[in-house]
Amino acid sequence: MCVRMIYQAGRFCWEIEMVTAEAFWDGVAAKYAERPIGDMAAYDATLERVASYLEPGDRVLEHGAGTGTTAIRLAPLVSGYVAADISGALLGIARERAAAQGAEGIEFRHAGLGRDTGADAAAFDAVMAFNLLHLMPDPQSAIHAMADAARPGGVVITKTACLNDGMRYLRPVLWIMRKLGRAPAVNIFSAAELDRMFEEAGLKIVETGWYSRKGAARFVVARKV
Ligand SMILES: C[S@@+](CC[C@H](N)C(=O)[O-])C[C@H]1O[C@@H](n2cnc3c(N)ncnc32)[C@H](O)[C@@H]1O
């Protein structure tokens, strides 16, 4: 159990966490890995936009890499790809899938966003996190950590559920599922609040979009100036 401060609907509040994020994701890893991608067209469209920012010589860091699906798709486009995740169980699945698909050039790292990733500051051309920032206890610090890992001129690329803008009906469902240990802690903020967090971290937003059938997944590309 841990007590943590979270950012919810425009304010900070205290929350008692019954399981850590690492324990939660380790516990659901096998089931999570079985789930197909919900909206394949949106996923493909997002990856197309991400790929347009990558160069063959780039070094990329992806936080919250999960089962490695995105890493396996993007790693062939660049010269170095670090896929990091807080869950050892998900990373195990990602390693197995990469090996089974003959994917090369991915370094899997057991590390949480904001914690020591073993990476030098400003070491990456692109730092990415998909469907992760809304799960972070302090998304602003998480964006700062991503900005620190990017080189000047490099990009931070994210896709984030902004539950203050859409899918509001999910909020009570999430609350109940969370109490049952079936969902992780989720921060609720709007796209406008998310954009402000990027700006406060000294990043310049160069592209935004909504890539999800239901409309609450905000894509943001921001450049470190
Ligand atoms: C909703 S899943 C998204 C997985 C993948 N990025 C995707 O889009 O399919 C969230 C992922 O973030 C990881 N995660 C949760 N909290 C984290 C943290 N503090 N630091 C790094 N990864 C974290 C989980 O283990 C899980 O793999």
Image: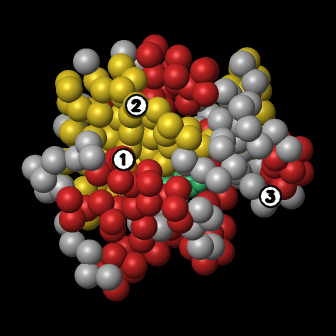
Tell me if residue 31 can be seen.
yes
Q: Position of residue 6 (x, y in %)?
A: 69, 29
Q: Position of residue 160 (x, y in %)?
A: 56, 41
Residue at image position (49%, 58%) is: 43
Q: Is residue 187 above or below residue 180?
A: above
Q: CA distance from mark 1 to mark 3?
A: 34 Å
Q: Nearer the viewer, mark 1 or mark 3?
A: 1
63 with respect to 38 (left or right): left
Amino acid carrying label 2: it is: Glu
Toward the left, the furthest residue is: 57
The numbered disc on residue 181 is: 3
Q: Secondary structure at mark 1?
A: helix
Q: Is residue 180 above or below residue 52?
A: below
40 with respect to 16 (left or right): left
Q: Are marks 2 and 1 in contact (CB under 8 Å)?
A: yes
Q: State how the image is colored.
A: secondary structure
Q: Are marks 3 and 2 in contact (CB under 8 Å)?
A: no
Amino acid carrying label 3: it is: Gly
| Residue tagged 1 | 49
Residue at image position (35%, 53%) is: 48
| Residue tagged 2 | 207
Image quadrant assignment for residue 183: bottom right
Q: Is residue 35 above or below residue 164?
A: below
Q: CA distance from mark 3 to mark 2?
A: 35 Å
Q: Position of residue 169 (x, y in %)?
A: 86, 44
